[in-house]
Image (spheres, grey):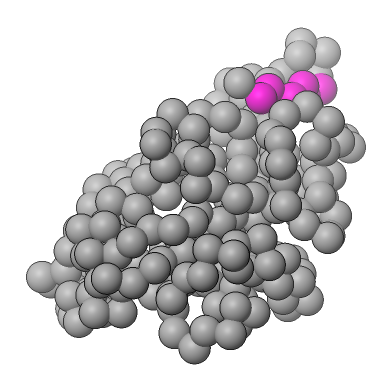
Amino acid sequence: MADRYGPGMGQIIGDRYRVDIGSQTVEVPLVPIGPGTAISLLMTIDHGIRFGEVAGADLAGAIADTRPDIVASAATLGIPVAIEVSRHLGLDDYLILQKTPKVHLVDALAEPLSSITTDSPQRLLLDRQRIPAVAGKRVALVDDVIATGGSIAASARLLRAAGAELVVIGSYLVEGSAWTAALGDDAHLVRSLGAIPMFTDDGDGTWAEVWD
């Protein structure tokens, strides 16, 4: 588990960034998101079954001492994280907060959210039929990457609105440091397997790490 978030956590290799995620080392592409700015984009669905299994086991080990009753995450990329972490914690159920307003979610609990990788406002939705799964329960909220912190903060608010006791926030990676302000008092709940920076164009056609 990463016990610090800052320089020295990874290495720029051309247009990719090499980083440790728990017991594994992966390379993720650098993707421009604006003039002179880029992120390293972890897409867990592109790293295969074995990656997800090992990362899930590593994250489960990092949060097991908080004794969660259930694991929660947000669709879509959080789904494989929740499945693997739940499996390695020995839990049989997990809860996914939805973003698509399907017919059974007409009266769902809702929370607005924004994401660095999505260019339009969204809402997180919690099926009222699933509220008993988290109400009064110790909940571990997990995700692949915590970037701005907006999605995780919205997820935390929605789970608490359903009566959950949020005991830990686990992630494969944290990005930069903006998430600490977004999470506020919940920032201390975060346990991550690794850390990645933002990137800025250093003026000669290469990227430089930015941790602030």
Image vertical order of residue 102 relative to residue 174, above or below: below
**Residue appearing at x 76%, y 14% in the figure:** 202
Q: Between 81 and 40, which is closer to the camera in this rendering?
A: 81
Q: Residue 156 in the image: x percent, y percent? A: 34, 53
Identify the residue at image location x=80%, y=37%: 9
Q: Nearer the viewer, residue 7 or 191?
A: 191
Residue 86 visible in image: yes
Magenta: main secondary structure: strand
Q: Quadrant of residue 158?
A: bottom left
The magenta span reads 206-211
**Residue 19 image offset from top left, x and y in percent:** 81, 46
The extreme bottom residue here reads 92
Q: Is residue 129 above or below residue 82?
A: below
Q: Position of residue 42 (x, y in %)?
A: 66, 52
Q: Who's the residue at 71% across and 36% down the image?
A: 4
Q: Nearer the viewer, residue 131 or 118?
A: 131
Q: Residue drawn 55% across and 78% down? A: 86
Q: In the rendered view, tell whether residue 30 sits above or below residue 20.
A: above
Q: Is residue 139 above or below residue 9?
A: below
